[in-house]
Image (spheres, rainbow, N blue to C red):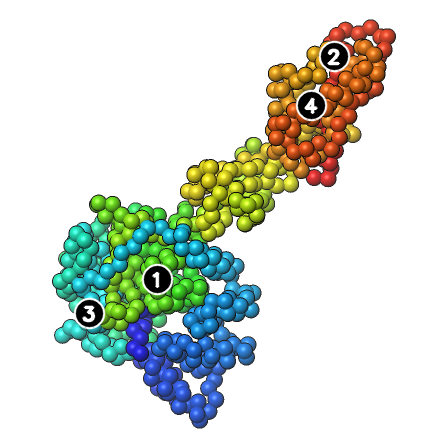
Amino acid sequence: MRHLIITACFLTLGSLWAQKDSKGDKYYFQYAYGEAVEAYQQEMRKKVLSQEQQLNLADAYFRTGQYTQAADTFMEVYKKDSLMTNTQFNTMLQALSRTSGKERAMAFLSTRSGQLSGTLLENAEFNLETLEDAENSLGTYEIFAPYINSAQADFAPSFYGEDRLLFSSSRPLADKEVYEPTGESFLNIYNASVESNGQAARPSPLAWVPQIEYHQATPFYSEALDGIFFVQSNMDEDALAYDADGKNALAICRVGKNGLMEFLFRDLSTSFYYPFYEESTGKLYFAADFDQGYGGTDLYYVYTNRGQIMSQPVNLGPQINTPGNEIAPYIFEGSLYFSSDVFYGFGGMDIYKSELQGEDFYSIPVNLGPWINSNKDEFGFIIRKMPEGGYSGYFASNRPGGMGGDDIYGFTVSEKPGLKTLIVRGTVQDLGNLEIEKAYVRLYDSEGTLVKEAYTDDNGAFRMEIPWREGVQVMAGKERYETLVIGNTAERPELQSGQPLDIRLTPLDAVVLQQADRALLRAEPFHFAAGRTEITPEIALVLDQAAASLMKFPELRVRLEAHTDSRGNRNTNLQLSQKRAEAIRDYLISKGVAPETISEVAGFGEQQIINNCTDGVYCLDMLHKQNERYPIVVVNYNDL
């Protein structure tokens, strides 16, 4: 089966490697994977392949669609505890997913978890869970094949104004050479007209890009700059340019309608792919295979001044980039769309979406699901709003039923596409605006089961993302701080938006006063009517505040005390104080305080007079009232 490496995944060019003793190696490094498989098989009859050659053979099997042979060969090497890279491990997991199911692939993933980033493992688990629930899909798709596809490779669509479309194609042209690894023409940039229903037709080469004999591909038109970014073969004058190892790579170029072209990125040993210019920030995004990346090709950006490079490349980080290959970045309405062949997709390249939430901060990339992706390659996703409502766009795929190796597909969708997730992020501070480190933020499902927990960093910041659930409860707290119930997503829609939360926690010492021998809940003094136990409105105001404090700190355990003055009968005062303490308890519970919070209720009558106003001593009323008091004693303060 023919496999178009240059168009499906990498746009990697053939290289003039020095002659090797191994024909398998020679074909493999020239990307002639079918021939490499045959050559390696012949060599295996004569000698044992090196582990590196076995990995090459496994990769060649995979790229020619021989997934069982790929999985078996990868496993053979893996059992020897070899030098398998994370990228090769990713390909092995893809092969296992295709032949044995994702369960087996995930089982092998755990054996290498110590060498993989926690972010990758979290993203894998997240996507596998999210894809189980098809109801979380946003929008209804209609997918169609425009009239621009050919029997050759057609891919990398790009909007060109309101009524034109740019794309890449390997259809034959008189001034293009044949690219040996595919047997088709070197790539060229085409444009086509677009009708109101999204149908595209009448393709022709884009005249104002200076033509060369070799690759020109993956165009992106910038309306603000009125120019096109694209990639092309590195050349010296009219010939391909090679590095010291005989490698010819792709450079990023820009051209205006005046035909003046300039190189923006050119490195004979590094290939660059899929430029995307974000006009609002001046960032130029692209994919590249730098050695220091996370896997094969990673996504990067640079700052520009109207397209002129002004910074070093910035890697988008492990939230986006994986041990696999990431290509084709496209930003729309705060969402980053791109393609990846990471192992937890449907197979090959899948399209993912991540939300941009501040500078260099991305949500977990979520697979767009089976409504767009298949077990083949999907890449080059673009989207825009339609005047009449909804969205339309294009992507490329080598799925069965097309005209060539890769074909362009159009789509319309009623809503912005993606799978719904819940993002909870923000900062936790105290009442004095100081950040609280190591505070917990917890998410509970509608049954009260803990779904996820995060702790704030030294700046008080936190972030969590989970597959969509209805009615998630958000709670925050820390030892010796309040436990704050922030709300339920079903009742507070603003919690569903992913906007940062500003959480303020009350410290324990703000509600508890520590004395020499005990700790008391802070509360204003109050008094009952003489001989009475009813909770008056004035008393209720104080107890309401006390109830609020106790509910902020459900771990508190308190003793309610009641003390009277010495006026009246001693036994009567003792009984009165007990009834008053019980009345306070009942009121607090009626206001939501958990019964277990109140560990003891004690009436002391006039047993603990705090001044000289004992029986038989004349005192002013104000001095007698000093003895009537109702402290709420925190009995477990030192244990918190």
Q: Earlier in the sequence, mark 1 or mark 4?
A: 1
Q: Which residue is mark 2?
A: 531
Q: Residue 184: which quarter of the image?
A: bottom left
Say whether residue 87 is visible: no
Q: CA distance from mark 1 to mark 4?
A: 63 Å
Where 355 falls versus 408 (above or below)? above
Number of the label disc, if any, that sits on residue 373: 1
The residue sitting at 64% across, 36% down in the picture is: 554
Q: Earlier in the sequence, mark 2 or mark 4?
A: 2
Q: Nearer the viewer, mark 1 or mark 3?
A: 1
> Which x, y percent locates residue 592?
61, 30
Where 410 falls versus 46 (above or below)? above
> Which x, y percent locates residue 372?
33, 59
Mark 4 Cα-neighbour bin, 10 Å: few <14, some 14–19, many ≥20: many
The residue sitting at 73% across, 23% down in the picture is: 581
- Along the line of sight, which residue is nearer the eye, 360 or 320? 320
Going by the image, does 409 lie left or right of 473? left
Mark 3 Cα-neighbour bin, 10 Å: few <14, some 14–19, many ≥20: some
Q: Nearer the viewer, mark 3 or mark 2?
A: 2
Hey, what amino acid is under mark 4? Ile
Q: CA distance from mark 3 to mark 2?
A: 98 Å
Hey, what amino acid is under mark 2? Gly
Quick one: quadrant of the C terminus? Answer: top right
Where 273 falls versus 457 (above or below)? below
The residue sitting at 64% across, 31% down in the picture is: 593
Q: CA distance from mark 2 to mark 4?
A: 15 Å
Please, which residue is most extreme toward the right here? 616
Q: Earlier in the sequence, mark 1 or mark 2?
A: 1
Hey, what amino acid is under mark 1? Asn
